[in-house]
Amino acid sequence: MDQSKYIEMYLSEGADHLSGLTRGLSADSALTKESISELFRNAHSLKGMAAAMGFEATSRLSHELENLLGRWRNGEPQDEQGRERALRATDILHRLFEKVQASGNDSGLENEVGAWFSSGGGNDEKIVGNDAPFQSADPDTNPAPPPKHCTVRIRVSIDTESQLPAARLLVVFQKVKSLFPDCEISPSLAELQKSGVKTAEFGVSEHPELKNLARQIQSLPEVAHVEISALETAESKSTLVSTLRLQASTLDDLLVRISQLLYHMNTLESALPGDEKRKQKFWIESHRSQLHQLYNEILEARLVSFDSLIERLDRAVRDLSTRTGKPLRFRVEGKGEKVDKLLLEKLLDPLMHLMRNGADHGIEPPAERKSAGKPSEGTLLLTIKREGEKLTIVFGDDGKGLDVESIRESAVKRGIISADRSESLSKRQILELITLPSFSTKTEVTQISGRGVGLDVVRSAVESLGGTLELESEKGKGSKFFLIFPSAVTLTEVLVFSWSPEFNFAIPASQVTKLYPLSQYQIAWVEGAKKLRVDDTFLEILDFRMSPVGKEGIAVGLALGSREIVLLVSEVKQTEKVVVLPWGPPLERIPHLIGGALLSTGEIVFILDGVSLAREETEAINVFQAK
Amino acid sequence: MPYKVLIVDDAMFMRAMIRDILVNSGRYEVVGEAANGEDAIQQYAALSPQLVTMDIVMPQMDGIEACKEIIKLDPRARVVMCSALGQEALVIESIAAGAKDFMVKPFSAEKVLKVIDAVMASS
């Protein structure tokens, strides 16, 4: 729901809650019970308003703040740290409000919000005190058999999307009780609350009004199915299905369908005459926000915990330790983090690869470690962390690190770069060279890693998932590989641009570093090539424009390893999250084309792989320069 | 004749949103708005609305207390609770106390009308 008339109200009323929070939290003394309740309400109201407006970051953050305050309200001790944390959340909320004021939405602070969440304490999903189960019950008790006098069973299922299923079933229960005051519900309310099961049974008896009751139940909101059946014996058992397995592709199909629905919405909207459009805006917007919510819920359903992968890696480390004869320790941080299932499956290979590399090339033999003053046991460390929209997986070893000089020499010897050029590269850029195909710093072939470090395989696996690979290394101390992914693999944020008015193209936003309007930056000829001048450096240029336009174009910065290359385009339109659909044959064979997508405007966009474009171009340049 | 509704919520923003949804449907008329439970009870007594939408978390007197008081006043009162996710226990408590139904934030027009239409139709 995105109506300007609500935005104003949202901002003004929200500002009151925000200043209430700031005032309350920055008080010198410990908070009284009343002031905590007041703060709790402030956070709660903010959450509700932000959710209604579709401001996800704001509602998530205020939800977590509400939880924190809820714990204090229920008597958990308030410490300085928690106070500090609550204040920081309030600060970020202030800034989110400023965003809304400036741009009409609260996006753009994902890093800050993510950092707040990952700074600990906040992400445990403890239930706030007064939400504790209504009555206590033994969780292990089976649904009680219906009382003896019951001859008929009413079985009611509610919509799977129902958000408070137990409350919904209680409404049904009340309805049943209006005819059968002694009726009982199974499973019990407390169990329903705990399990979130969406089906319940009511034991009743024959009654002339029974059919009518069923009709009334059916007309209640969120009721999906009502079934009346005669009870044969007391032991007729109910089997309730609480989980079901789906193929990931089923969810993907749903996502595609939703984006088609969004497309239809847009078509419908643009077909309406102007005044009609204004009149129906509310409905259109609420429809759209529902679809977006549905979309996000499906994405959420795809997430799985990282744990399952850890087990396999753990085993691999033990094997590696035996085979290399090096004692190894495997440490994992943040394994509870949830990631897209598809991503998790495809991560196994690259991670195994890095692991083998680390054990084989990184970690020194125990004797060498001892003389270097290190513990004889080598450590492999895997860290998984989510920062805003990004998921970062860091794999590190405390081995001997990469030798920048020998990489430089080897690169020159192999003709990958010229000697001159190698001198001008930074340490980081040199390190990046080892991710080029068939590059190796090790001459011998080992049983475990084979020939070459094979980091190019890791890099292309990471990039095919829309991620980037970065590395850091210090001689004698170890190496670290950073695998950075957009958090939802199926949903890619893209930058939409055009070379000519007829067609839209897009690049994954994760590949874009910066936009340089040509009205502010100059193109210069350097060593026979056109380059973009940015302060004191010159960036290589990719130019596919049909008719080069002077000052009106924009240079889009692309990250290629630690270097930056710019792509000249005529116009940059917007960034948008889209479902990327692969092209079928024969279009799929076009190089650099990842796929296509529908924009929320209903237009079709071609999605290009900026990194592959840039790499092909620059490798051509490298080869040229080496000769 | 549109049904008379009293909207109870401490956020003006939420009240405006619910009011628009109800009024735009053409089936409801908002006769009063209250920002806390005590005010809600007084307005209920004065206006005798046919339906009340009741927020749960409010200052002074919360929605559950207010719901109980209103039902004490008028056992046939139709009270619909407005809840956020994670407040299931509170919603259950109020339905057990006699609230007719509930809706979960964020609200959409469709959700709100479906619940309220159903409550009006069934009693």
Image: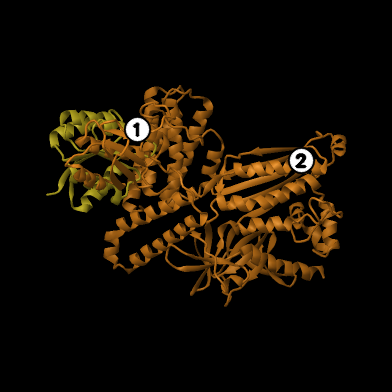
Chain colours: A orange, B yellow
Query: Farthest residue toward the left?
Result: B1
A445 relative position to A530: left or right? right
C-alpha span from label 2 to label 1 = 61 Å
Amino acid at the residue labelled 1: Pro
Quarter of the image for residue B72 reads: top left
Label 1: chain? A
Residue A446: percent from left, percent from top: 83, 51
Residue A525: percent from left, percent from top: 70, 71
B10 relative position to A482: left or right? left
| Disc number for residue A145 | 1
Residue depicted at x 56% and y 47%: A339
- Which residue in the structure is indicated by mark 2? A398
Residue A585: percent from left, percent from top: 57, 72
Numbered disc in front, either 2 or 1 = 1
Classify mark 2: helix, strand or loop: loop
Q: Residues within 10 Å of mark 1 (few under 14, many from 20)?
A: some
| Disc number for residue A405 | none
